[in-house]
Each structure stands twice: as C-alpha cells, then as structure tokens.
Amino acid sequence: MTTTSDAPPKAGFRPSQLIYDTRYRSLTIQVIAFIALMLGLSWLVSNTITNLSALGKDFDFGFLGQRAGYDINQRLIEYDSTSTHGRAALVGILNTLLIAVLGCVLATIVGVLAGVLRLSKNWLVAKLMAIYVEGFRNIPVLLWILLIFALMTEATPQPRDFREGGDASMILGDTIAITNRGVFIPAPFWGAGAGILLAVFLVSLVAIFFWRRYAHRTQEQTGRILPIGWGTLGLLIVPTAVAFLALGMTSGRVTQPVLATGATEGMTLADYAASQQTINACAVPFSTESLNLRRLMRSQEIRFNYVAVEDAAGALTALEAGNCNILSLPASVDIATVPAGAVALSDTIRRGMPVEFERPVLGGFNFEGGLQLRNSLIALWLALSLYTGAFIAENVRGGILSVSKGQTEAAFALGIKPSRTMRLVILPQALRVIIPPMISQYLNLTKNSSLAIAVGYMDVRSTLGGITINQTGKELEGMLLLGLFYLVTSLIISSAMNLYNSRVKLKER
Amino acid sequence: MKKSVLFGALTTAGLAAGAAQAATLDDVKERGELNCGVVTGLAGFGAPDANGVWEGFDVAVCRAVAAAVLGDPMAVNFVPTTGQTRFTALASGEIDMLARNTTWTFSRDTDLKFDFVGVNYYDGQGFIVPTALGVSSAKDLDGATICIQTGTTTELNLADFFRNNNISYEPVPVETNAEGQQQYLAGACDAYTTDASGLAATRATFENPGDHVILPEIISKEPLGPLVRHGDNEWADIVRWTLNALIAAEEYGVTSANVNELASAPGTNPEVNRLLGTEGELGGMIGLENDWAKNAIAAGGNYGEIFEKNIGENTPIGLARGLNAQWTNGGLIYAPPFR
Ligand SMILES: N[C@@H](CCC(=O)N[C@@H](CS)C(=O)NCC(=O)O)C(=O)O
C-alpha cells in the first residue's frame, strides 16, 4: 500500500486518477480487495471468538496432553489407550503419510505403465488401458475404496477357515495368508550383525550410483555400452548376500541362555512356567532374540506377556524393577552381574541370523506373528493408487504425444530399439510436460487419503479429526490442526516436486 | 482447499454459537417442525418403516416432544447422526435435541456443553459372538478382533476392559451400526460390542439370531437419554418434563387409550389432573399449552406402552423391563412429582 507514494511525483495528481488513470487503477482495486478480505477475515475471527464464549467453550490446545483412552489398530509407533490425544494424532499422521507414500509410488508406476501402454500399437492392450483409465477416472474414488474393501472382506476366507478341515490355506509355501482381516506376510526380525548388514547394503547402493555414472560416462566418451542392468543387480545382491552368510556362520548357530528370576539353576522352562503365575518376557521388539524366545514359548505352549524394552540395558533395568521375570541375553554377558537373582534355565535359544523372518501362524482367533497388512490399508492403497494412476496415465500419454514424432523416427533411423527409444529419447523429453500436473495428482492423492474412515483406516482424520474431536468436543482446534497438517504436507510435496521439476525441465543455456 | 477448511471451521463455529443463543422453543414454533437427531438405523430404537416413517423407542421421545410443543407428533424432521456426528449436529444447532441412545457421562454433560434431561433406558455394554466360536466369557476374547463403533463411550470402555484384564484385542473401527453388523456377519471381526440393548436390536435383524450369543459380562453403565444444548434452560425443561410426563403417565395408568377421556374432565387423582391440564397451569409454566402432556401421551402412549411396542418382550428385540421397570415394580424408572 505504501507503493502509492512511490508513484512518480507528478504535478497535479488528482484523486480521480485513482479510478480513471490506468496507471493507478489496478493498484486501487487491489487495495480495496485487500481491505475487504481483511475485514471479512476479522469479522469471521471475532464472530467465532464471541460465539465460542457465548457457548461457554474455550479455545485451547490442552486436550492434546490428555489421556486418549481409545485404541488404534495400526500403529507405527508405540501407542496404547493410556497415551495422549497428541500421540494419537501422531499415530494418525504417520498412518496418513504411510498411505500417501505407498499410494504415490504405486500410482506413479501404474500411471506411467498405463500411459505408455495406451499408446501401444497392440489394439487389445491399448483398449484395455483405455477402459482402465476411463473406468477409474469417471467413478468417484470413494466408491472404489468401498468396492475394493467389500471384495476383500466378503470374498476372502476367515482366519478360522485355515484350521484343519477348513477350506482355506496359506500360499507361497505357507508364508502368506490372505484373510478377510488382511494379508499376513512374514515379518523381518533383526539380530546380531544387522547393523553391519545394513551398512554393507548402503555401501552397495553408493557403489551402484558410481557404477551407473561410470557406465554413462564411458558410453558418452567411447560409445561402448556397459551392462548397466546386470551390474546394478549384481551390486545390489552379491555383497549383501555374502555379508549375510558370513555373519550367519559366525552368530547364527550360537546359542544363548534364557534367564529367569525366582528359578533354580538348570530348571526347565516348562517347570519354571508351571511355578509362576504369569510369565513376562523382556525383549527388544523386532530383535531375533524376541523372535526365538517367542518360538521357544510357543513350542512349549506357554502363555506369556511381552514387555518391550529399548536394549539389553533396558531389559536389565526392567528385570530389576520386576516388570518382567524372564529374558535372554548374549552369552558374553556375565550372568553373575545380572541383578534380581536371575539364573539360567536349561533351555537356550539361538542367537539368530542378522535378519530372520517370522511367518504368520494361526493363533486363537487370528493369525499371530508376521506383519498384518489390514484390509483397510490395502483397499485404501489400491483404490487411491488405481484412481490417481488413471489421471497420471493421461498426463503421461499427453506428455509422450507432445514429443514430436520426428524424434521417434530419428531414433529408429539410428537403429535404436523401440523400448530404448521410449526410455532414452521420448520419456526424458516428455517428463517436463508430465511433472507439473503430476504434482497436483500427488497432492490429490494425499488429500483423498482422508476418506480413510470409510473403511476404518485410522489416519489423522480418523484419530485427531474424528475420535479425539468427538471425545473432547474441540472441533475448532482439531479442524485447525488438521488443516494445518494437510497444508504443510501439501506444501512439502509440491516444493519437493518443484525441485525435481527444475532439474528435468528444458535447460536454457 | 486449505483455506476453505479453515474458513469452513470458523464459519461453522460462528453459526454454531449463533444458533445456540437463540431460544430453541421460539425457533421450533416458528419453524413448525422439531429437528430431532436420531440413529442412522437401529431396529426398535430408531429406523424408518416400510413407508419411510420413522419409528422406535428413541424416535417416540422426539414425537412426544413435537406433540407437546406443536401439538402434532408428525411435525418432526429426523436427522440421522452417527456416533461421531451427533454432538457436532447438536452443538451447531442443526438439531434441537438428540434422542439417540446416548450415554449420560460427566464430560458430555459439562465439558462438551450439553444437558442430559433424563434417562429413558438404563443400559450396559455387552459383547456378541458367533456361537460357533465356543466363547462363553468376554475374558476368553484374548487376541480377538472386535468391531467397535467410533466416537462412542463403548470404544473407551472396551479399551479399559481389555487393559484391566491384561488381555489384548484388535479393534476394527466402524462408523454405524449397519457397518458393524455387516463386518461382524462377514466374519471380519470375531465379536461386536456396543450397548446390550443395541446388541439385542441388532441380533433381532439377523437371519439366524440363534447362531449368535450375547456374552454374560456387562462391562459398563450406559444410562441412555435425550439431551439438548447447554444454556437454554427453558428448552431443556420442556424436553425433560415431556419425558417425565411419559414416565408418570405409566405410573398413574394414563394410556394412549384413556388419555382423551381422562383429559376431558377433572378426575379423582389430582396429580393426573395437573398432568393432563384439567387442573392448574403447569403447561403455562414451561411456555406451552395446558394440554401439552395430553398430546405427548396421545402421540405414542406412556413410557410402558412405548417400551412394549418397540423393544418389549413381544417384539423381535425382546428386551425385558429389568432395570427399566417403574420404581414401583423394582426398577429405576421414576418421575418427580407434577406439582
Ligand atoms: N451409548 C453409547 C453408544 C451409542 C451407539 O452408538 N450405539 C450404536 C449401537 S447400539 C447405535 O446406536 N448405532 C446406530 C447407528 O449407527 O446409527 C454412546 O453414547 O456413546
């Protein structure tokens, strides 16, 4: 607004110029619009404040620190009903981000494939892709979510059908169970040497990066084509596999004692369990010790509670405090130093490989162990990805069509294979047309994930924006926080994509 | 999009309170219709019949209030609400009252700024499981998957129950009773939990009700009753005393069959006379006509009649009076004197 005074100090400025002089008119309009906007905004805010107080409600975020009291099924971080509403919101946020990331990745893969294939010369493939795109683009995403969810719950067997005599069975060598409560897959557990394994893997990723750069440079300089694909694959697998075997040889067979308080030296686990009211086992979540301890308990049909601890030291403190009465430590730890009079039982467990997989097994009501991909997650993920993928496919198709046909013909004339032409000639040029609309597709997907409650997926809209608001009556605060979260997430996504866009867009030198 | 969320929230809050300040009675009279929040559909408690006319135990309270205020039990606009939307609907003024098996709790009555006007059903939370599971107690449900309606007290009780008993479960959140029923019947959850009355009502609609048992444990107290916004005491009085009128009518033997006759001339029982307006000016004291209670009772009968017709032992839902018998019969249903 101060700019008005910046105008060149001409003699004889008349106020009517503000309207009739094109130099000032747009400025005048902007100032008026701005004032109107501010007035509207302040009216909204003051109206809200007076009405809130008339209703006797205050505006504060203290509820975030109160006990939530409800349980959430899918938790990426520690959470139970005694945690706070703030923590519940965080669990929801992570669930939203999880579905957003999974969705964007799958939508991109599906979209690029469908977009390219829709231009295929193969009539059947092209038509199939056209049907996919039109079908998904023209039906509301909520219907797709509900449809996929209904299919997953109604058309798949219940866990109890997997029992002997039931008509369902697990697939892929009894490792995966598809049930109406979700898909249960093996879960990874990390043992001794997992850190080294991870380091080796990371180093090979770096090596792959340099290998590809080297290969590209060689090709540019000498024209010699190095086997990029095989090299990448080899680097990805071989070093890690070798490290895994080597580590497994050293630590895989080693056993370690199971320690218990209030036991006599050399007692069997079965006898100990019989002598105790409850068995509480301290173990680090997702460690092979916890896995092997559980396997041991399960093989003897001993019921126990699982007490999660941070690390070996944490396990000792928990034992000292009486939170658990059983745990297992590496043989290198001197048993005499273990507090609370814990002694070794006659049973031992294997130390375990750097990484081991636990298969889901049928328990009382459900499959236990393994990783549960709930139907709500799968339905939401598939529906959002397929829906957004259809839009991305059209962006990709448009991008490809925007590249002049001469490019393809030139590439063919040089004898480049069609698949390489697409990958090396067309797509790089198409990308600068594809990326900008892609950003808004990612944003759409992320925001559409708030439909999660329709299938009971506990995203941030369901936790903070649903149950928490309902239990605490803090609609305004909750909705503001929710809006803020989506705003920040969207801004982050678009700035990341813009960064990428500026890398692939036409460089003007 | 982001901006509109923010503005949306602000405007709703603004409107919300705007409506809350006005006198609800005047609004209802001016509108000629009562906006009553009910369930989305729960047999016996609130559901539209084959002709689309809402009926049920909770719906009858709405009709009685409409009859008392407007003289016409059909002048009700029913607004279906879920466990999660009901409180926002009431706080924002979208509905004038909520009669949707809602539990009277401390925080709802105080912190959420509502006023419960009484209890029309004393309930508790139970579990239903397929007989085939062979479960006989809720404590056997360790590791089970349980369908639970979000935004309810039952969700919190469930968490507490399993925590206190040191057993684990996997919650499957659902939004409406219909959704819960569908998930439960598809076997996506091993058990369904909600108010025992709701379980009975839900089971009554199953194809084979006999294949499902309601477990003996009742894990909470759920006094269900109608509620209104905090702050409009005149309106709260009207809803409260309409409910009380239905209850008192049962106690004194006033039924839908004899109410017109009893209201035509003063009888021998002065309390009945005052209730039906043949003596005194009770109606005027709450801003209504003197035949308000007569109209309310004529709408669907007294409390006992409403109970028997919608959820009683001769209906498919088959609930016994139990705690919900009149205090004279050893129950908890009790109306203060009309004096
Ligand atoms: N009394 C509890 C639960 C009330 C509730 O949501 N009940 C369910 C089952 S009995 C219901 O009425 N559902 C009907 C619907 O989904 O509309 C509360 O107030 O939080």
Image (tube, coloured by chain):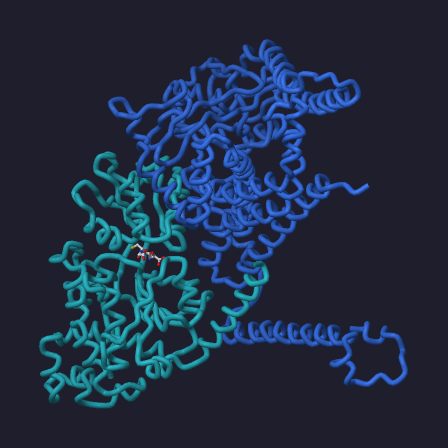
Chain colours: A blue, B cyan
Q: Can residue B166 be seen in this snapshot?
A: no
Residue A235 percent coordinates (x, y): 66, 17
Residue A507, quarter of the rendered image: top right
- Whether residue A1 is visible, yes or no, is yes
Rendering quarter of residue A408: top right
Q: Is residue B153 above or below residue A301?
A: below
Q: Is residue B314 left or right of residue A195?
A: left
- Image quarter for residue B93? bottom left
In the picture, the quarter occupied by the C terminus of chain A is top right
Q: Which quadrant of the figure shows ligand 1?
A: bottom left
Q: Residue A345 in the image: state x and y as whole percent.
A: 48, 16
Q: Is residue A134 above or below residue B247?
A: above
Say if A330 sits above or below B78 in the image.
above
B124 displayed left or right of B277: right
Q: Position of residue A329 (x, y in %)?
A: 56, 20
Q: Residue B143: horizontal and vertical position, in percent?
A: 37, 35
- Which residue occupies the foreground of this view, B205 or A328? B205
Task: Between residue A422 and residue A193, name the one nearer to us.
Answer: A422
- The residue at 73%/16% (across/down) is A224
- Residue name at image x 26 percent, y 25 percent: A166
State the quadrant of the N terminus of chain A: bottom right
**Number of marks present in the image shown:** 0
Q: Residue at x 22, y 57 (%)?
A: B43
Is residue B171 positioned above or below A126 on the image?
A: below
